[in-house]
Image (spheres, grey):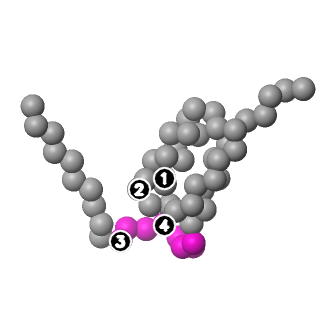
Amino acid sequence: MAPSKTQIAIVGGGVAGLVTATLLHRHGMDVRLYEQTPVFGAVGAGIQLSLRS
């Protein structure tokens, strides 16, 4: 019997949900992403990162 893949459910398709789903999928896990909105689109929100050396 072949080992089964880990199955993961992520609820929420915001930035964190999408990034988490993408990274877990790249590591070979079976990911299901659940979001209540029918269409993804820009909402005017953004993220800004600044690094100091």
State the separation of the CA atoms marked 2 and 3.
12 Å
Which span of residues is magenta-colored? Answer: 36-43
Element marked by disc 2: helix
38 magenta-colored: yes
Crowd band around label 3 with a 10 angstrom C-alpha radius: few (<14), some (14–19), many (20+): few
* Residue at the spot of label 4: 40
Q: Is residue 43 left or right of residue 5?
A: left
Mark toward the start of the polypeptide (4 vs 2) = 2
Q: Return the x and y of residue 36 as percentages of the image width and height.
A: 57, 72
What amino acid is found at the position of numbered circle 1 in the picture?
Leu
* Residue at the spot of label 1: 18
Element marked by disc 1: helix
Q: Is there a contact, CB below 8 Å, between mark 2 and mark 1?
A: yes
What amino acid is found at the position of numbered circle 3 in the picture?
Val
Above or below: residue 34 compared with residue 50: below
Element marked by disc 4: loop
* Residue at the spot of label 3: 43
Element marked by disc 3: loop
Quadrant of the image containing the C terminus: top left
Crowd band around label 1 with a 10 angstrom C-alpha radius: few (<14), some (14–19), many (20+): some
Q: Return the x and y of residue 14 as percentages of the image width and height.
A: 44, 61
State the separation of the CA atoms marked 3 and 1.
15 Å
What amino acid is found at the position of numbered circle 4 in the picture?
Phe
Q: Is there a contact, CB below 8 Å, between mark 4 and mark 2?
A: no
Q: Is there a contact, CB below 8 Å, between mark 2 and mark 3?
A: no
Crowd band around label 2 with a 10 angstrom C-alpha radius: few (<14), some (14–19), many (20+): few
The dot on residue 49 is: none
* Count of numbered circles in the view: 4
* Residue at the spot of label 2: 15
State the separation of the CA atoms marked 2 and 1.
5 Å
Q: Is there a contact, CB below 8 Å, between mark 1 and mark 4?
A: no
Q: Return the x and y of residue 23 as percentages of the image width and height.
A: 50, 39
